[in-house]
Image (cartoon, grey):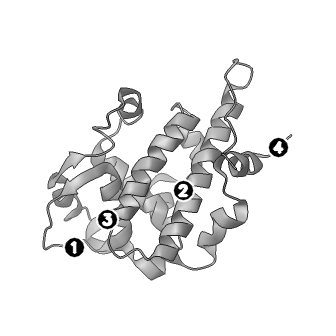
């Protein structure tokens, strides 16, 4: 029987070595907090006003500036996705919460301070995504938006983008494998391997 990591590698086409290359360098230290905030904002938002205030970790932790930054955003990406089934995944979350949860997890996972765990506890990705239909189709849609967000976020060098996208792809399919495990015995079709 394959482990979830082995299934994630098979289905995503990304080896665990490639996926966890993010651990070879401290991407957080290389890119900084603002880049992760911008990446998560770009993931959930297509366009945003440029504002002179760049939030710092202290101001974000105090919720100063962060709420104002979010209020200036418009043209949402994920919350206005063309696919209703995909929008429904995010229906019980505000855009502000979604952005914060995502950037705090990314910061923590990529070498920064444990912002996510400090506020929400252990990431436990499979458990946190358990209520959602994390299918191959959903993973690919999420990855589509993340690729667009990476491409539209300044200050991320190509090496970091590549490492991050490999991590995101592998992790998305790790969640698909976890969803399959949850649904075993319910007659659901297994994910297809990535094309060679």
Q: Secondary structure at mark 4?
A: loop
- Residue 105 at what x, y percent from top left? 48, 59
Confirm or deny contact between disc 3 and disc 4 (CB under 8 A): no
Question: In this figure, what is the number of numbered marks?
Answer: 4
Q: In terms of sequence position, does the residue under pointer 1 or pointer 2 come before the other?
A: 1
Q: In terms of sequence position, does the residue under pointer 3 or pointer 1 come before the other?
A: 3
Which of pointers 4 and 1 indicates the residue nearer the eye?
4
Which of pointers 1 and 2 indicates the residue nearer the eye?
2
Confirm or deny contact between disc 3 and disc 1 (CB under 8 A): no
Residue linked to disc 1: 54
Residue linked to disc 2: 168
Res. 191 visible in picture:
yes
Height in image: 157 above or below 118?
A: below
Give the Cα distance between marks 4 and 1. Answer: 45 Å
Q: Quadrant of residue 49?
A: bottom left
Q: Nearer the viewer, residue 181 or 143?
A: 143
Query: Viewed as shown, does residue 130 lie left or right of 148?
Result: right
Residue linked to disc 3: 38
Label 4 Cα crowd, 10 Å radius (few <14 / some 14-19 / many 20+): few
């Amino acid at each position: 029987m394959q482990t979830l990591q082995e299934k994630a590698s098979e289905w995503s086409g990304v080896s665990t070595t490639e996926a966890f290359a993010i651990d070879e360098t401290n991407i957080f230290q290389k890119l900084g907090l603002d880049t992760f905030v911008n990446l998560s904002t770009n993931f959930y938002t297509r366009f945003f006003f440029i504002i002179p205030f760049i939030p710092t970790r202290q101001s974000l932790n105090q919720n100063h500036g962060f709420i104002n930054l979010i209020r200036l955003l418009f043209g949402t990406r994920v919350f206005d996705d063309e696919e209703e089934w995909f929008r429904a995944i995010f229906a019980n979350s505000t855009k502000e919460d979604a952005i914060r949860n995502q950037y705090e997890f990314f910061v923590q996972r990529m070498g920064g301070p444990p912002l996510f765990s400090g506020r929400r506890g252990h990431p436990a990705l499979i458990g946190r995504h358990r209520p959602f239909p994390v299918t191959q189709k959903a993973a690919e849609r999420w990855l589509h938006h993340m690729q667009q967000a990476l491409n539209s976020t300044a200050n991320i060098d190509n090496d970091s983008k590549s490492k991050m996208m490999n991590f995101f792809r592998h992790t998305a399919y790790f969640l698909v494998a976890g969803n399959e495990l949850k649904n075993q015995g319910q007659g659901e079709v297994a994910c297809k391997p990535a094309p060679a």
